[in-house]
Image: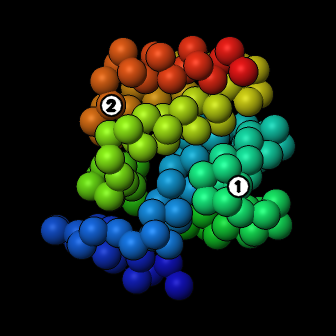
Amino acid sequence: MFQDFLRRLTAPAPAPMNEIDSCLALGALLVRVARTDGDYAQVEIQQIDQALMTRYSLSASEAASLRAECEELEAQAPDTVRFTRAIKEAVSYENRLSVIEALWSVVMADGVRDDEEDSMMRMTASLLGVSDQDSHSARIKVSAK
């Protein structure tokens, strides 16, 4: 199932993503960020589900099902660069800011920020074409909630 998606994602000149592919790419990126510190905590899983519910108007069971697919996809995916490239090409800058907010919400969900997560967020924001200042503002916005 994911092999076709991964083949399209890793093509030298990938075609623009459809909405389903965009959901999968974002979900897999959320899972990847949550797994960065080696502790894929239940609170992070719940935050991923919440982000998917909010972003795509899904029910709790639909979000959990999508997340499960994204977990499998993330485990098979070769690298973060291809996810971010696909998202960057498919999503406007303003919407990429909301992607960064969703990523920060997952990082902050367990109440602990470590060096691996900070490094991953710096790299991811850069690959998405989001400035350090905008990523910092997104982190502060998420922290204030």
Identify the residue under disc 2.
Answer: 130
- Which of 54 and 46 lies nearest the eye of the viewer? 54
Residue 53 versus residue 23 in the image, above or below: above
Quadrant of the frame with the C terminus: top right
Q: Of helix, strand and loop, which one carries label 2?
A: loop
Question: Residue 42 is drawn in which quadrant?
Answer: top right
The numbered mark at residue 105 is none
* Residue under the point 73% across and 47% down: 50
Instruction: Identify the residue shown where x is 59% and y is 19%.
Output: 141
Q: Nearer the viewer, residue 102 or 112?
A: 102
Dot 2 amino acid type: Val
Percent across and percent down for residue 66 are: 67, 67
Residue named by callout 1: 53
> Does residue 119 appear anywhere in the picture?
no
The location of residue 104, given as percent across then percent down, is 58, 30
Q: Residues within 10 Å of mark 1 (few under 14, many from 20)?
A: some
Tell me the SS state at disc 1: helix
| Residue 27 picture location, percent across and down | 57, 56
Nearer the observer, disc 2 or disc 1? 1
> What is the three-letter code of the residue carrying label 1?
Met
Q: Is residue 121 above or below residue 136?
A: below
Graded by Cα atoms within 10 Å as few (under 14), some (14 to 19) or many (20 or more), the crowding at tag 2 reads: many
Q: Is residue 82 left or right of residue 74?
A: left
User: Residue placed at 38% from the left, 38% from the top?
Assistant: 94
Name the image colouring: rainbow
**CA gap, disc 2 to disc 1?**
23 Å
Residue 83 visible to an observer of this rendering: yes
